[in-house]
Structure formats: structure tokens, C-alpha cells
Amino acid sequence: MAVTIRDVAEASGVHVSTVSRAFSAPHLVNPVTRTRVLAVAEDLGYRPNRAARALTTGRTHNIGLIVADIANPFFPPLIKAAQAQARLRDYHVFVADTDEDPQVEEELIQTLTKQVDGVLLCSPRLTNKTIERLREEVPFVVVNRRVKGMPTVLMDVGRGVRLAVEHLTGLGHRRLALVTGPSGSWTSKEMQAAAAAMSEADVTFLGPNPPTELGGLAAVTDVIASGATGVLAYNDLVAIGLIEGLAERGVDVPGEISVIGVDDIVPGRLSRPKLTTIAMPTAAAGRIAVDLLLGSVDSEATSGVTVLETSLIVRESTGEAHT
Amino acid sequence: MAVTIRDVAEASGVHVSTVSRAFSAPHLVNPVTRTRVLAVAEDLGYRPNRAARALTTGRTHNIGLIVADIANPFFPPLIKAAQAQARLRDYHVFVADTDEDPQVEEELIQTLTKQVDGVLLCSPRLTNKTIERLREEVPFVVVNRRVKGMPTVLMDVGRGVRLAVEHLTGLGHRRLALVTGPSGSWTSKEMQAAAAAMSEADVTFLGPNPPTELGGLAAVTDVIASGATGVLAYNDLVAIGLIEGLAERGVDVPGEISVIGVDDIVPGRLSRPKLTTIAMPTAAAGRIAVDLLLGSVDSEATSGVTVLETSLIVRESTGEAHT
DNA sequence: ATACTTTTTGCAACCGGTTGCGGTAATGAC
DNA sequence: GTCATTACCGCAACCGGTTGCAAAAAGTAT
């Protein structure tokens, strides 16, 4: 059915090895035979079988991209950028969704490992120990979490948090709250650490909460009780849920309480009031992670940590404190 | 490095073919040898190499999923569902983004074809002719577009449009507008056809427009000029852009103009006012498309058309007409 | 005990490519 | 004109599995 390298060889009167070389080692074959072979191949509609090639070369030209939840608006830009960058390098990408389940995540890595040259782990839920064990079988690049001795792409939430807190205190807010994320989240821990380190600010931690609008809604009572007038939420979805819930209680944003999100996802840009937020360079993270991964596939294992800048985007959900 | 079937064979004192059968044809091997082999395999951490297997069996256990734009919020739920369903059947999925470029789309299909058992084409931008040609090389299921003689999953936008128009006329709106999508879009054509077929309604078509908030913003002037008080937009993003633009002109939604979107994406659910919209069962479409594809991989080519119901979700962006 | 099945296993070819090695012809040096 | 290089190409083994065929082992009937 499909046209193979032998069909091309026969049709152009050369040995298969010559055809093979015409494609993957052009300098080893006479230019005139080469063009003839290529013409025949084109004519027959020959396409090299990458899986077969992988068998001998050891390079599959595939990578795996594992995320906790594809539908979480944080990930699509990252996936898109990673995919685009991979394509540039002539790589295909397997995308897998773990549904936030570490068990599934491990299994996925296991079955994927033979078919890929490396995998991108985005916000993995696995334990560090498991990740280190799995590392023996396939190169990783970890995004959005720090794992000792492993190439990593991080976004500097700490800086984002500092900017956000400064923004709020600059507006006159004295009591602040941080609505945290899931207990296992590395980002959430980072945010807490950064906030706690700012001695000049009085920040209450409220959580853990699920990383969705529901998490924000659930936190409304605590936020009000805390007496905070400036709130930083784990992410934009939580922030939106929070604003929603505050509105239901008759609390105006930003009139009475200022709210800042994290991620700068589309829904935040379109919400009303438009969300002030810490922008995460997710697309850049995807792109760079792929470069790192494919770099470390050829040369030897990088294990550096790349930290990407975040920034505060001030929109309409923050305003001056009215004491 | 990696442990192969021969390592297992040697370690358990049998021939490789026996090991192979222990995995893929259990009934052909003595139960006691089988358990022994399996134990050794487990012990050595053996994982069959799917790519190698594919070479002889012709089944890669991979599928391709091609979409125009991963970051378009319409797709992630579909991707997620398709991926989950594929996993259930022990399939992996390549996700590729074409950036709305037919050229890229074709190239992607070409290089993917040898590595997959079938591909899901979501809202393809390719011509029908090209799709039919490519079909020779790999089984397709097409989502969100009708291609003659090809297994297809559609969502009944026509019905959605009728419901939306009825909803608007029911609220007393006499002059309606349809802000259409890109000129190549099958969905956009369907919407126009459905609206035009409703003789009792007076609908002006405004477009084409890009399928984003910018498209909505750009259409504002025309919408106002049309005198319509009820507007149906190509999708939620366009609707949000439109509402945004109308607000800038001091036109209240739904006070003066009612707006309906399509897709029921997250940003729409969170926008203010909350968007009335035609919900598309994208997750179901992804799931069913995979089933169709994997079904047609084994049994012979289905070429039926599956049509999924859409529904109108009334929220806050539509209200009574004030004449 | 013999002949005939049936089960279990090994052998070897094959899937579609790649690659080290060796052979042949052409080129260049002398 | 001879010899050493070099350029080009074919041969055959190999990657990690699967599978048709046949041999060996075990079971059954006579």
C-alpha cells in the first residue's frame, strides 16, 4: 500500500541504501543520481517512515507534552507555542492530559517514553522522587516547578507578587489577603513565600482553594472576614470567582476591595471590571522549554534553571483604598 | 540501554517469539512459562516499544488531532475530551496547530500520516478536493465541516440559530443582525443559511470578520448603522468584542441592543454582562470523533454524519426590545 | 506400545528504514 | 603507465518487535 524506500530504489534503479542516503546523507551520493532519486520519490509520493527511522537512529523526532488539564486556560498558549517551536525543528508533539492525577501522569510517561526523545512536564503533580526515577528513562524539562538537578523553566511569580503587593500598598491598602491555590501547588508556595518575605506588608493567607472560579467563590466569606481591602488571588479564575462572589454580597470591586489575579488569561482580559493581573509568559515558557529539551537531546544534559520575567498588568480591578 | 524483548528472552530462558506471544497472544503460550516471562519482564522493567511493534502490525496506536488554533478557547475542551477518549482505548494523540494556514495543515498531515492510524480534522481550512486526496493515505474524521462521503461530526448550529432568532423575536426585536465569521468558515455559512431561511425574521448580514474580539470591535459601526436591536455574533469572542465596542459608544447591552454569541466558552460565562450564547457540545464532539475514527480503523470506513445538538443558554446579554 | 492430535516452542523472515564496510571506477600525482 | 586517493554505490546486518511455519513435547485414542 504505502510506498517504501524499496519501491523508490527499484523505480530508480539503485540500491535502497542509496535512496536512504539521498535523503539523510546527501553529500555521500552523486548529485545527478540524487536528483534522479528525489524526482522518482516525489513522483511516487514517497514519504520516509519516521517510526522506522527511529528504530535505527534512536531519534524519534517526537516529544511528549504532559499537562494537568488542557482545558485550564493557562495551558493552551503554552501548548501552542511549544508545538510551533517543535514544528520548526521538525518535531511532532504528543499532548497528554493527566486530569491532575499523578498515577495517570506516571503511566503516561511510561508508555510515552519509547516514542519520544524527551518530555515536557508542565506543573507536574508527581513527587520529586518519582520524577527523578523516571528521568533515567527519558530526558525531561520541567516547567513551573523546581526539581533538583533538572532542567527547568520557571516564571518568576515571586517578583510578580512583590510588584502586586507594592501596587496595593501604593494605593493605600494596609491589610492584604492572599487567596492561595491547591495545597500541592509549587506556585502557591512561591507566592506565599514571597508575600511573607515582605515585612512591610500585613498579609493574611486564605486557603487552600481549588484553582477555579469555585475556589474564588468559596473564599469570599473569609476575605470579607479578614478585613483586607487588597486581595491577591492564586490565579485569574479564582480572582474572577472572587469578584463574582463579592458582587453578590454587594461589595464593589475596586470600590471597596481591590483584586489582583495571576496568569493574564483571556477570561481575565474580558471580565468586567477588567482584571489587574500578574502576566505569566506562558508562550515563551513553552518555546524555551522545547529549545532546552531539544538542545539537551543532542548535547549533554543541561540542568540549568531558566527564570522568566513576570509583570504586573494594571487594569480596572484595583483602585485606591478608601479608609 | 533500554531493555528489549531479547533481554527478557535471555533472562527467562526462552526464545524472543515466546516473549512476544506472552504479551500479545497469551493463549498461545503455556500459562506457567507466561507468568514466568511476565515476572522477568516486570523485574527488568521491560516496556514494549510501540513504534517497533507498529512496523510489523501496521497499527501505531497513535492518532493525530489537527486544529486551526489551539489557543482559541473553542478547542481545548475538544482536545481534552479526544485525548481522554483515546487514552481509554490505549491510544496516544499528536496535537498539531496549523495557525489557520492550509499549507501547514497539508504538510502536517503528510508527515503525520505514517505515524498514526487516523487523524481528526477539526474545522479544516483545506479545500474539499485536497481533503479527498489526502484521504487515500490515512483515515479521517472531520469535525465541524461537511465533506462529501467522509465520516463527520457536526454540531447543529442551524438549530441554534433558529432558537436564537426565536428568542430575540420573542423578546420583541424586529430588526436583527448576524455578524458573520471568516469567509472560509463552514459554520459561518451554515449560520447565514439558517438565518436566511427564517422568512419571518428581518436579518442583516454583516461581515466577514475575523473570529476574535477584534472582529466584534470592527463590526460595531455597522451594527449600529444597521438599526438592529438584536445581534447574533459568529462566536463568543466576537460577541464580547462587540459588547465592548458598543459600551465605548455608550450603547448599553442588553438595554438597547441584545447580543448572542456562539460556543459557550469560558470567557463568555465570565464576561459582564454574562453572555447569552449557543452552546456547542465540543467535548462530546471530541469523544465521538475519536470513537468514530478508531471504529473505522478496525471495521471498514464509516462515512456517516453524526449531528450533535446545540442549545441556547440564556444569560444576561439579551433582554426585551424597547421600541 | 503405536499412531494421531493438540499444545507449546523455536526458527527465520519480515516491517522500513540506517550504516559500517568493502568494492569499483574515476581522478590525480608522479 | 602505474599507483594511491577519492567519490560513489551496493551488500548485509541491524533496530525491536511480530508471525507463518515446522519441530518438539505432551496428551489421547486405539
Image (cartoon, coloured by chain):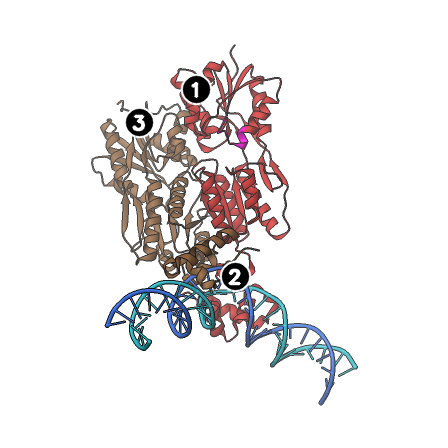
Chain colours: A brown, B red, C blue, D cyan
Please state which of the two labelled residues, at mark 2 or mark 1, is closer to the viewer.
2
Q: At which x and y percent is residue B168?
A: 55, 19
Within-10-Å neighbours for mark 1: few <14, some 14–19, many 20+:
many
Which residues lie in the magenta part?
Answer: B179-188
The reply to the same-chain question for discs 2 and 3 is yes
Q: Quadrant of the N terminus of chain B?
A: bottom left
Taking the spot 38% from the left edge, 18% from the top edge, the residue there is B248
Q: Does the magenta portion include B183?
A: yes
Q: At which x and y percent is residue A297?
A: 34, 56
Query: Is label 2 in contact with label 3 (beta carbons under 8 Å)?
Result: no
Q: Indicate left or right for B304 with B316 as reference.
A: right
Within-10-Å neighbours for mark 2: few <14, some 14–19, many 20+:
few
Chain identity of mark 2? A
Which of the 4 image quarters holds residue B173?
top right
Chain identity of mark 1? B
Q: Tag 3's secondary structure?
A: loop
Q: Which residue is mark 2?
A: A10
Taking the spot 35% from the left edge, 41% from the top edge, the residue there is A283
> Label for residue B257?
none
Q: Nearer the viewer, residue A293 or A317?
A: A293
Q: Tag 1's secondary structure?
A: helix
Label 2 – label 3 distance at C-alpha: 72 Å
Q: At which x and y percent is residue B176?
A: 53, 18
Label 2 – label 1 distance at C-alpha: 63 Å
The reply to the same-chain question for discs 2 and 1 is no
Q: Which residue is mark 1?
A: B220
Q: Give the main secondary structure, helix, strand or loop, of the magenta stretch.
A: loop
Q: Indicate left or right for A86 with B165 as reference.
A: left
Label 3 – label 1 distance at C-alpha: 28 Å
